[in-house]
Image: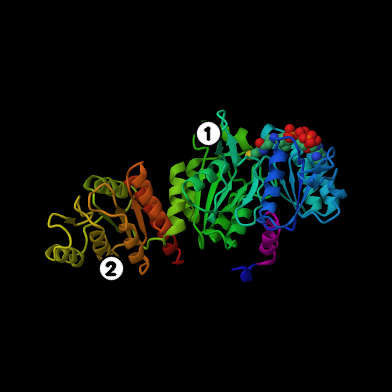
Amino acid sequence: MVNELDEETLSLIKQIDVFFNTESIAVVGASKTEGKVGQIIFKNLADNKRRGIYRGELYPINPNEDSILGYRSYPTLQKVLGDVELIIIAVPAKYVPSVLEDAWKKGVKAAAIITSGFSEVGNTDLEEEVKHIISKAGIRVLGPNCLGVYDAYTGIDMLFLPETKTLMNKNVVIATPRPTPGNIAVVTQSGAFGAAAIDCLAGQEMGLSKLISFGNKMDIAEQDILLYLLHDEKTKVILLYIEGIIDGRKFMEVAKKVTKHKPVIALKAGKTPAGARAALSHTGSVAGSDKIYDGVFKEVGILRARNMEGFFDLARALALQPTAKGNNIAIITDAGGPGIMASDECVTLGLNVKQFSEKTIGKFMDLIKEGEIPSFAAYHNPVDLTGVVTSKMFELSMEILLNDPEINGIIVLGLHHTPHLTEDFTDRIAKLSKGFQTPIVACDIGETEMANYIRSRFNKLGIPAFSSPEDAAYAMSGLVEYGMYLMKRGYL
Ligand code: COA
């Protein structure tokens, strides 16, 4: 993809890449004081360097210290002996302009300004002053008022949120986990939501490629990051949390290019007047009409998540499964009630749960005749294998569904509670599905050990699994919506 790029895009990609792949980082405001923003960020990077994950140079900048965590400390950037490509700024807002003047003289290429206290609190003059310096200096800036970036592959970790916390009873617990390397990128205007998002991804065993928090987007905005991620080989799915878009035209132009190749899932906050007011004071964003956002997302092929859970459910589905080439969905279950729930939700979401073809029905009748599935199984859609279900019954029935060209997606409700169902039905279904392009999503209901095991097993085998029939249907609707968008545009 990179070969076809024009000069401007290529140059933008190179500039943004400094935030993720760099030879040298300086933390301005690195501190020895436990819990300070500059202390946590510097320690994250020093830890990752020690573990061999971050391989570049690392410099603390602090006028009052000679060394921090064993690294020689410098009073200013200019005093650093080697080159500095990337800086992370964690000093109070009033010092930020002078730090950037210094960075200009040092030849710094990129800066993440973690510091708050700019346009989001009405301090627009200071933000303008900084803008003026960076445009003269040609320094690309993320923020201010942001978390910066976290790259699960290169170990660049600017999150000032400690990975663990000690409870009052002295137990140490994971507080802000760093997810394992994976293929989902999180792009967020809200830093706090970014941290929560990676907590959710890690807890749900989903891997992350990059987290990018852009805060007030003084320079780099969402469309620049989307364009960068389009060409990022590690990223397959992009999760975008936004409060307001400034340059709508540019955003649409870039989003169309990105969604042609990679799914983008948006969570847009600030739907109501109260939410819009909150967005204004959070990142200075004008939320705008929610209907306009709906229209824009549809037009450019961005999937708008219905809520926070839906955001991650769609990410899981699109990261693991191919898109659907139509909206005819088959449901297969060992539990009648959840089969009805999934059917209802599918129809509510605009999916078809129509009766199978005569040929497919005939194949199920043959299975009954052969004694492979019970005579009382239902086979008109949903397929209900009932409480006597076995792994083999799931496998034989799935084979019929996967071979039906009229079926565009399959929802497997494999409730583990039935007496004869062994956990290997997950493996059998996954193995079988390898030879087909029909997307599959699964569901097991329950909050205890076995349900967690089945869902986790499915996920590891590449079949996204959910804890309710409605969530499974919603995930399938995302695979259908994106597939239909690609087909309508002639991309599939
Ligand atoms: N160059 C280098 N170091 C400098 C400096 C400069 N020009 N000016 C000050 N420092 C040092 C300080 O001496 C201090 O080090 P010390 O602990 O050894 O004394 C360190 O930088 C930090 O400065 P300090 O004045 O202690 O600030 P702070 O740590 O209390 O707060 C911020 C700084 C950036 C964290 C704070 O202003 C802020 O913006 N907090 C909010 C961050 C946030 O929420 N961002 C959005 C996330 S989504």
Indicate the amino acid at tag 2.
Asn
Instruction: Kindly identify which residue carries mark 1.
Output: 275
Q: Is residue 439 magenta?
A: no
Q: Earlier in the sequence, mark 2 or mark 1?
A: 1
Labelled disc at residue 177: none
Secondary structure category for the residue under label 1: helix
Q: What is the crowding at mark 2: few (fewer than 14 residues within 10 Å), some, or many (at least 20)?
A: few
The residue under the point 59% across, 55% down is 226
Q: Which residue is mark 2?
A: 403
| Residue 379 position within the rendered picture, expressed as x and y whole percent measured from the top left | 19, 58
Give the distance between the C-alpha atoms of the residues marked 2 and 1, in whole angstroms: 47 Å
Residue that appears at 43% across and 56% down: 460
Please state the horizontal and vertical placement of residue 454, each as a whole percent of the image: 35, 51
Which is nearer the eye, 430 or 359? 430
Specify start and end residues of the magenta stretch as a single range. 6-19
> Which SS does the magenta portion mostly show?
helix
Which residue is at a point 73% across and 40% down the rendered structure image?
A: 90
